Amino acid sequence: MTIDYTERIPNNVNLAGDRALQRALEQWQPDFVGWWNEVGPAGTQDHDVYLRTAIGVESDDWAHFDYVKMPDYRWGIFLAPAAKERRIHFGDHMGEAAWQDVPGEHRANLRRIIVTQGNLRRIIVTQGDTEPASVEQQRHLGRTAPSLYDLRNLFQINVEEGRHLWAMVYLLHRYFGRDGREEAAALLERRSGDADNPRILGAFNEPTPDWLSFFMFTHFTDRDGKFQLKALAESGFDPLARTTRFMLTEEAHHMFVGDAGVSRVIQRTCQVMNELATDDPEKLCAAGVIDLATLQRYLNAHYSVTLDLFGADQSSNAATFYGSGLKGRFDEAKFEDDHRLHGETYEILEVKDGRLEPRRVPMLNALNELLRDDFIRDSQNGVDRWNKRIEKTGVRPRLFLPHKAFNRRIGTLSAVKVSPEGRVVSDAEWNARVTEWLPTEGDRAFVASLMGRVVEPGKFAGWIAPPASGINGQAFDFQYVRFG
Ligand code: BYC
């Protein structure tokens, strides 16, 4: 399963054995490079970056670290090794051999086949769309990096999101014919935040204008990536399962960057709180650090917009995806039920007489909510880690996850206004207090004012602590990026 880097498109899928596919992807390649140059990381043409590149797909040997000129990064197509005799392990096709091709080709019910193929394509397109979107959102962050170490991590994430786009485009080209090629072209045409041709999902049209937003995004929104990819790694469509399994190995670093990034901001803030013996936001701002209340507002914004990414709390799409074996649950094998779920129920929250009330509904329809709840538990662990970090400095811990109904735009809960504590509030109260709960123009302007580029090896901006250790065993005064 080694990756062939002598090919124009590095791959471990024997691309050379399918000339038509290879040609089609080689035609898409310059469009991808054009997109990268137009809306990828700005001003990086002459950057030499200490990056990891996949050289294999086995868990212990795939990462190779070296300097790479940014425009020379080798994006490719890598699938995790196939599991022997893999079977579909959930839904109505449970027990059948996993599909090596688009499901249903030889089945009698044509209408169902078309629906299943359409759903599979839709899932792949939605997943694929998020990848270039995040690169676009992060385009200008390199100009205000708090250190060389952070700059390198940003670029690592950007090139890997680019590769994740390749992963989905390969599936579209390989398995969906002309429709797939058209979808692959459209993935390079939509733009994050564009009024006429935006990215598909809400969070991917929000700006990521500063590094606090970037760390919150990689902590929360990349964590949605983890949960969605884990659900897709269960897929009965084996090429999707294998490609998402490999993507997950890369995703872990992205979440680490967010988790550790916020933690370092907290550490620096608490250090200054102790030095000045104050928790007064104004004094802390004047000292050039981000106070915990501002941090909480950023957390509230990124967490709530990410909760929306799981879709509506009741979704017939989700039921169909599961029943037809396309998308499983997080860690499907760990559930001790029949993995078909007819007759099972799950609790969701509903709005009744202006109050939030639990209600049990068929689990098949509530699979988005189930995955969202898995994500909430994982996010809570993250906040617990941050609070421990605060506690260690002697400052009183105070970060928390807002209620899941807070600031929602998708699903039943979008019909009500809810405070971070979970109390339904009137429009008037929401409007009066929203500046306590979500970042204000003033917060954003303040955070933006802290963002100045620091590129001297081993130096860090004043609003963030250095990391606990460097990348790949290197020191943190290592020259992670060389400028040409
Ligand atoms: N914004 O029935 P519903 C990642 C739409 S992140 C706007 O609930 P469904 C990454 C929905 O499309 C992981 N629209 O939908 C992270 C539907 O529209 P139509 C990305 C939304 O299908 C960081 C309608 O509302 N991967 O990898 O059950 C950096 C009805 O909703 C939103 C995936 O998402 C929204 N937030 O669930 C880089 C996996 N939510 O068809 C990368 C693939 C819903 O009526 N996607 N809508 O026009 C899916 O599995 C599903 O599409 C969703 C939506 C879970 C997203």
Image: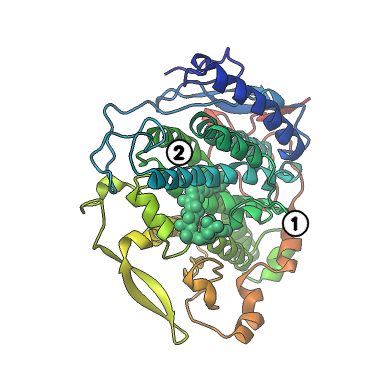
Single out the residue that lies furthest toward the top. Answer: 6
Image coordinates of residue 121 in percent, x first then y, are 50, 42
Disc 2 is placed on an element classified as: helix
Q: Residue at x 37, y 41 (%)?
A: 235
Quick one: label 1, few (<14), some, or many (20+) residues within 10 Å?
some
Q: Is residue 58 visible?
A: yes
- Residues 156 and 287: in front is 156
Q: Residue at x 74, y 51 (%)?
A: 451
Image coordinates of residue 410 in percent, x first then y, are 53, 66
Q: Are marks 2 and 1 in contact (CB under 8 Å)?
A: no
Amino acid carrying label 1: it is Ala
Image coordinates of residue 349 in percent, x first then y, are 40, 73
- Residues 462 and 222: in front is 222
Q: Which residue is mark 2?
A: 248
Q: Residue 448, which numbered label?
A: 1
Amino acid carrying label 2: it is Leu
Q: Is mark 1 within 8 Å of ligand 1?
A: no
Q: Is residue 90 left or right of residue 203?
A: left
Q: Is residue 101 left or right of residue 332?
A: right
Q: Is residue 71 left or right of residue 262?
A: right
Image coordinates of residue 448 in percent, x first then y, are 75, 56
